[in-house]
Amino acid sequence: MSVIMTQLRAIRFWLVLPVIASITPQSALAHFSYSDPRIIHVIEGTDGGVVVLMRLPAPLALLPSDWRGSDETRLPPFASQPNGEAVLDAAALSGDGADLRTVLGQSLTLWTGEHRNVPTVTNYQLWHDAERPRFGTVKTAIAVFEGQSGAAPIPYFDATVDVMLSFPDSDLNGPLRLETRLGDSFQVIEKFGTVVKLHRAEGTHTKAVIGPLDVSFPAATTRFGAVRDAVLSGAEHIYRGLDHLALIVLIALAADGWRQALGWASAFTVGHIITLAAGLYGFAPSADWFIPLVEIGIALSIVLAGVAIFLRANSALGWVGLFSVGLIHGYGFAASAATALFAGDFDPSLLSAFAAGLELCQFAIYALVLPVILLVDRYMPMTSVSWRRAVALGIALCAVSATLSRLSATSGVFAVA
């Protein structure tokens, strides 16, 4: 059981960054939280070249590599300590901010082929974590730099910095590599997530990583390539997500045949796509509790489905029930880092391709699972009901463990002691 759950957490860790896999803020050697990922938008500048819009914890950008966390006695850079708590020093940040711009300019390296590009810090904004505006799409990220920074003083270790870097000699459509050694000496960086969104004419390409940042993008693809990638991304979301695989197996166990199984699967996909699109358009709560609540709801939906089959209440998994479950799973995907594939200039055709990938992968898995179930029923006719119930109960128990684990990991968000 422990091996299965370890594998489950590992796979979900890469899909749900919700971050990404652990949402409870944690003070580690770097003294900042990894609960929210670093977000990077890579876009074309108005006069050509490449512009990077980046959000990250201010301590990650400002602290020296030899910072010792809670054991440190030095005052952090650009900080003052008027009341015993380190805050961003307004005097140090005033004027043209040349010193701060120098530090922020070292926060990211952009390579085009073998050429290392030197950035210019065009703009920056500082915020209290609780007051920062949205940054998930290009539109909201650009709007951040058109406003005013948060009011001072800002507690140093609760500060977020948004940085605009310009690389005028770079080509957005060429091969790109983004890397930084920022925070390599901090223990927390091993669990810190980064979402990189490359916005090109043919669509938005996304990569999500855990740990030190080093991601590469090939040269721009054709429209066909963008649609193909969206289809593959949809399929990958199914076969790499144990939550979805578990639900597919439960649907196959509960259904009376091919037609019913595929009809129920389509109900799940319809619900999934509705809330995926809703999440992309911002029709979802932005409160800290929402993502953890959805993740717990996803695990609970597996528990309830398994219990329903064990209790022979298969009708509960009908079209309406699975449509409702799909709504929950869709918000989970919309809240995760992988959803960023469609962020920015939203292209409905890519979402349609993604949905096609979901369906094709589901049908392929049903094509593998249903014959096995029918064969077992044929050669074990006297136990056809009992073995299905046993498998469903086993899946439900695994999901109970996942639910408790997620509830424990997110207790701080719900103020649970």
Image (spheres, helix red, strand yellow):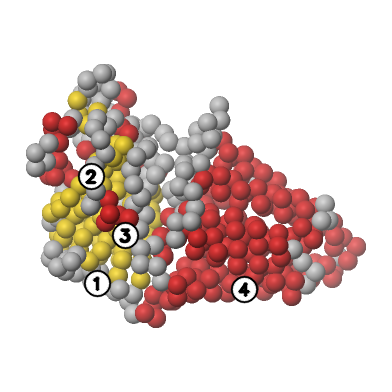
State the quadrant of the C terminus: top right
Q: Amino acid at mark 3?
A: Lys
Q: What residue is disc 1 on?
A: 173
- Mark 3 residue element: helix
Q: Sort mark 4 into few (<14), some (14-19) or many (20+) by Cα contacts within 10 Å.
A: few
Q: Work out which residue is located at the far top of the displayed protein and give it.
A: 84
Identify the element where label 4 is drawn: helix
What separation in Å lies between label 1 and label 4 (alpha carbons)?
35 Å
In-front residue for pair 157/133: 133
Q: Is residue 34 above or below residue 163?
A: above
Taking 372 as reference, is 111 left or right?
A: left
Q: Quadrant for residue 104, please give it.
A: top left
CB under 8 Å between discs 3 and 2: no
User: Disc 2 marks which residue?
Assistant: 148
Q: Which of the labelled discs sits on residue 364, or is there none?
A: 4
Q: Which mark is residue 139?
A: 3
Of callouts 1 and 3, which one flags the residue occurring earlier in the amino acid sequence? 3
Residue 370's image quarter? Answer: bottom right
Mark 1 / mark 4, whichever is N-terminal: 1
Name the residue nearer the viewer: 404 or 115. Answer: 404
User: Which kind of residue does numbered mark 4 sit on?
Assistant: Ala
Under mark 1, the amino acid is Asn
The residue depicted at 56 percent of the width and 30 percent of the height is 416
Determine contact: label 1, label 4, CB under 8 Å: no
Give the mark, 2 or 4, whose residue is nearer the N terminus. Answer: 2
Front tag of 1 and 4? 1
Residue at 67% across, 74% down: 367
